[in-house]
Each structure stands twice: as C-alpha cells, then as structure tokens.
Amino acid sequence: MASLNRTKGFQIIKDWFTAKSFAPFSFQQETWQHILDGKSGLVNAPTGCGKTFSVFIGSVIQFINEHPDNYKTKSKNGLQLLWVTPLRALAKDIARAMEEVIAELGMQWKVGIRNGDTDTSERQKQKRNIPEVLLITPESLHLLLAQKGYPETFKDLRIIAVDEWHELLGSKRGVQVELAVSRIVNVVNGQLAIDNREGEKSKVKSQKKQISVWGISATIGNLEEAREVLLAPVNFEESVIVKANLHKRTEVYSIIPDEIEKYPWAGHLGIKLAAQIIPIIEASNTTLIFINTRGMSERWYQTILDIAPQLAGAIALHHGSIEQELRWWVEEALHTQKLKAVVCTASLDLGVDFRPVDTVIQVGSPKGVSRFLQRAGRSGHRPGDVSKIYFLPTHSLELVEAAALKEAIKDKVIESREPMLLCFDVLIQYLCTLAIGEGFRPEEIFEEVRSTYCFADIKESEWHEVIYHITSGGKALEHYDEYKKVEVIDGLYRIRNRRIAMRHRMHIGTIVSDAMMKVKFMSGGYIGVIEEWFISRLEPGDVFVFGGYNLEMVAIKDMTVLTRKSKSKKALVPSWMGGRMSLTANLGHVLRNTFNKIAANDLDEIELKSLQPLFELQKELSHIPQSDELLIEHIEDKDGYHLMVYPFEGRQVHEAMSSLMAYRISKATAITFSIAMNDYGFELLSDRPIPVDDTNVHELFTTENLITDIQKSVNSVEMATRKFRDIAVIGGLIFQGFPGEQKKARHLQSSAGLLFKVFSEYDPHNILLRQAYQEVFDQQMEEVRLRNALQRIQNSRIVIMFPQQFTPLSFPIIVDGLSRYNLSSERLEDRIRRMQQQLEN
C-alpha cells in the first residue's frame, strides 16, 4: 500500500492547496489514503467543511499516481468517478468547483451532468465520449442501466460517490441507489473476472481498477447503519467511516416578541414579527429565510415586500414548485451576491461549499435537530466560520422548542434515518429497467439484489412472486396481456415489446409525489407547478398567490392552469399536501427534558425566561408535565367535554395515538369523538363526559393488541388504498400517461382502487398489497415510535387535572381543531381573539 505522502499525486495536490493558502484537513487526507488503498467508506463531516474534496480529490490523486508522466495530457480516459447527487440544483455548483480544480491542475478531465434537464444532444455526446466525472441523480442513473451496452459505460469506473447520503437514506430514492450500486459493482467485478480468466498479465491489470464506493454524509444518529446500507454490496467488513473531528460552532439567536401571549396559537405570530427581520437582512450581504411550507413562503415573500419595498429586486422566492430556470437564476444570483435575501423552503436545505451566505433565518420550528443544523450550516459555509441562525417563532410556545434545539445542539442529539426494507415496487421497476437494456438472468440478479441492505431478507418465494408479476401479471392479473411485460428468451429476461419499453422508459425513476399541474400565464410564460388537489378547489376568477405573483385563475386546459396577473388584495395562499412536518423523536425527547427546567423554575435561557407568565398561568390552572409524567386535562365548556393529553411525541404519533385511545374508550362505552392534535398533544372532544380516570388510564395506553387495535381504530384499508396508488405507479401497474397527456389524479386513484379490490379479493397475499399496509404502519402511523411512546407512558406518572378553563398548553390544540373542522362561519381569527379575551378576563 502506497503511503499517501510519498505519492506524486499528493505532492501535486499539496502544492495546489498551498498556492491557494489552504491546507487539507486531516479527514480529507485520511480519505485519500483509504481511496489509494482501494477501500470503500463513508465520510462524515459538518456542512461546509470540504466533504466534496475528500472524495473528488482522492480520485484525482489516484489518477495522477497511476499516470505520473502524462496525467496532464491523457484524455478520453473513460468514466473514472460517478457522482450521485439527490438534487439537480447541487450538480451545477459541484461541477463548477470540480472544473476549477481540474483546470488549475492542467488536466484534460471532463465533467458532465446527467439529470432530467440534460438535453438529448448532450446525452448523445456523453454516450459517444463519456466524461471522466459524471454527476447524476438516482433516476438518471437507472436510465443509464436501461441502455443497451451499459456495462461498457462503467468499464473504467474506479469510484462511485453518493453525495448527501443522509438525505437519500430512508427513502425509495435511497433504495434506487442501493440497487444501482449493486449492479455497477457486479458489472465491474464481472469484467475483472473475465480479465482474470485471460491470464496472469490481465490479472495484474485488473487489480489496478478495483471499484470503491464512498458515501458523503452530514451528521446523522445512525452513522454505522448508514454505512452498512450503502456499502452492503461491496466488501462491507473492510469499509471505513472517516469522521471530521471539526467543531462547527453554531450560534442561535431567538427573536423574542415584545408581548408574549398567554394563549398562543399556531402560525399567526410569525407574520407579525416580519418587521423584526428587515434590519437583519439589511445588515447582511446575503440571507436565507427558511419557511417550512411552500404556501407560507409565498405569504412571507409578499409580506417582506409590503413592509420593505426597498428590497424589490434584491429579494427572491425559491421553492420546489417554481419554474426551474427561475430557480437556477435565483441560485446563480445568490452565488454572485446580486440578491440580498431569498425566501425558501427545503429546496435550498442542501448546501454547496463556499456559497456566500452570511445569515440564516428559520421561521417556525424546523421540527428536527438535523434539519435545523443543516440550515444553520448554510451560513458560515467556509471551514472554521461560525454558523449564525435566527429563530423566529410562529407562536410563543415554539420558543420552548428553540431552547430545546439549543440544548440538543450542545449535547449533539442528532436524528437517525431508518432505512427502508423490502420495497417491492422499486424492485419491480428496477427489473423492468434491466429488461429493456441488456436483459437479466434471475439466478444472477437474485444474488445481487440480496446483497443490498433493503432486500437482504427477501425470501425465495417473494422473489419468485416478483418474477411471476413481471412476466405474467401475477395471480390476479395473469389473464390480461398488458401486465405480461417481460419475456424469457434462452433464459434471458427481456422486454421486447416496443410500446411497453417506451412506456417504462417514460417512468423510470418515478417516485410518486402528489399530482402536479403546470401554471402558465395566458400570454404563454411558464411559472411552475402546483398540486392538483389545491387547484380543484378553485373556480375561474379566484385569485391565488404563486411564484411571488397574485394570479387569477382563468381556465384549466389539460394539466395546465391558465392565469393572468391580478391586482386583487385578497388572494388564497396555496397549501401543499406535504405541508405539516412532525416533531422528531429526538427533539421530542429534549423538549420533554426542557419542561423539567420549566417545572423547577430554572429559566436561564432567554426563550424560557420570556415565557414565564405563560408557564405561571399553566401551573396555576393545571400542571407543568415533567419528562417522567404524562399530563391529562379534563376541560368542559359550551362545545362539550375536552380530554387533552400531552405526550410531546409529534403530530404523526399523536394522530395514531388519539385514534387508538378513542377506539379503546368507545369499546367500553358508546361514545363518539372529534379529534385534533399538534406536536405537543391531542384532544378528544365529545358531547358527553369522557370516562378516563385512575382506574382505566393505564389500560388505555397499553401496547397489548396494538396492531389489532390500530387496524380497528383508523380506516387502515382506506389509508392502504391511498398508499397503494403510489406503489402501483412505481411498480408500473398504472401508466401515468405520456408527456402532455397525463392522467388526472382521480383517474389514477380509481385505477389503483380497482386493482386494490382485485388483489384483496383474488390475491390477498400479493406482495404489493402487503407492502401498502406495511408502509401505512411504518410511515403514516410510525408504529415503532408509537409503541415506544406507549411503553414510556406505562412507566410514567400519569397526572389527571380538571382545569376550570382552557390552559396555555391546550389552547393551540383547540384552535387546530377549530381551523380543521370549520366549526364557525365567522372569521377564524376573530373567533380566536374573542376566545383569548374571554380567557384572559
């Protein structure tokens, strides 16, 4: 094994760093040594500390060492480094940084980008002469595997790098990466085996081109598992984790309202505080203002322009639904400091090294420690800089979350990302992808698929069912020719039907989101995309905010919303289905511990100190729950009997827990409920007293018969039917239509609903049907987390109180219920203000 320091490649890179007045970090040098040793691994470093260079420069050093005499002149070297990135937006910046290094070193390497935006001529050029570095999304990588002769593309490949692996882990896009890595590693290894059979001379040559896989990740809680998931198909036992022991300082400043409401409610406070961020924007060169939802980002953009018209032209809006070229322009203008501020959503979460962002403002709780640190890391993006982030609450209780976030950062409490298992829909799509390319032999591919983490536990019977599904349509659909996609020719599984192949190519990489419609001006300009379910509620003439404009809906044609600009002051703010994030388990844990300080009146932090009047009122009317307690409040008013429960486990867990509790109470006594919840707790509201007391409360939170009770408490069939639509689209059972003639969401849903019924009746053990129910339990109900929460409650002291009026903790949940069920025809804000006044009097 060559020592890095003695190699020519390292000396050249060291001189290059010195010329730029930089010095490589020890974690970068450690990675370079492992790359020279042919190892695979995972690089873990905070945002903005040079993770990209740790793998990219390693690839350059490796090449220089192998071609010491002609590394500057050697061109057309084949694909050396395959760089998988989850976001198209990142590719341009990474490519720019790489091209700069290559040019300064005088090398002939080319850097190419391959994603949904790469035009056909560029793809053809890449096919004829593959660049040395190819930046690619998981979807486009699968498109490469659908080409005939794809093994030739990878024959010279040395390194697969998967950037932002923490973002891909725990998603179906992550599973796509796992499968692609398993295929490419086996293709290259297969070529090595062929070389080896050609004699001793080739054997020496083949050992030079051992392929290694590197993940690049910001900090997550389950780093070991993250490594195992990505590197399962390579020699995992010999793989390494390279940690950057760099302390990245993060400073959090909370924006405290002048007046703290003792009865807070979600959402309204943020906009009231908007004026307070104008001086912050003006004192910084560039500021990112992160908003949790696309709908609220539209509202914030308009509000900032209303109160600071001098920022017109210096502030922009960026979210995933805005037209792509406009997003690119915003990213470029941010890069060159033409913009002072950008109002954005998670679309700018993932950072690229050395972007000049001075300040980050987080509006509303980010609901997770990792997300908060990721966003904070967008400022102070150079190694050694301090990341500054301002926290602006959207209701006063969120200041407790700010205090909890500070504590979590100090204690390094970081969330894990749970890997997905047995995603049969992705596997079916993948096998069809291979079948339109080179074809595959099931016995070979089965071993490969089983080498991935996701499919390590796949049974042979399940594999045979997958193969039966793609060749015959499965038990329920075997009489319909359109589901017989794959043919067997001399043991090779291929798709030969051109129509089926074309339809599959259209949807390779499809990972379902909600049905989107294009938004255009009548005059022709394209603005972006918006969810169909929002548009379906509008009539022609209605005005909505989108892309920074007030738009009047004129008509809907095909899947396009035709609009014109409107001067109307009243406009609807779009809400997207993915709008409400739920508190993570880690932040919930730290939040419960923060309440220990509150109960002990240990209010050192400015956030907790400012909330003292609210805490005192909560204590006076009821109780402040500590981490080893569960608070339950019985409150009666003119609307009925409210049972308030505060587990602090996040909205999603509370949704399942409230339904479970309602079901268990109604088993004992005939009673009906309406349910509301937020991240702190939930409400059961009934028109009669709710029988929960010391005699039965522990039984209500038991984990016994949990699965059965959950299935009975929520309409799991309805939830699974909705989930099945996505699975059916990914698995290719439902064709979404060609470009320009996409099927409407309701048509897809009715097709999926029909298939769901057919499977339920004629093939109840169907793998895709089982997957739909499993995903409902794992993702929508978070069954594991719910079980853990119930076990924690069983070991807690349950405190039951009977306040005479609503408490500060109960009020936001009550309001959530009002806004959800539209209990009153009067304006919601007026009603809430009147309730606040009555309570305070």
Image (cartoon, helix red, strand yellow):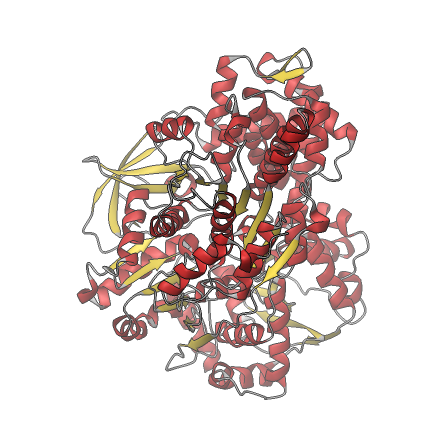
Expressed as whole percent of the image width and height from the top left, the position of residue 254 reads 43, 77
Q: Looking at this rendering, what residue extends furthest in the front direction?
A: 69
Q: Quadrant where the C terminus lies?
A: bottom left
- Rendered image quadrant of residue 258: bottom left
Classify 298 as above or below 754. below
Give the total number of marks visible in the rendering: 0
Q: Is residue 495 left or right of residue 563?
A: right
Q: Is residue 195 left or right of residue 788?
A: left
From the viewer's side, name the closer residue of 110 and 228: 110
Q: Is residue 485 left or right of residue 532?
A: right
Expressed as whole percent of the image width and height from the top left, the position of residue 713 reads 69, 49
Residue at 44% in and 63% down? 48
Could one spot residue 590 in this view of the protein?
Answer: yes
From the viewer's side, name the closer residue of 368 and 354: 354
Q: Is residue 416 left or right of residue 153?
A: right
Expressed as whole percent of the image width and height from the top left, the position of residue 102 reads 38, 48
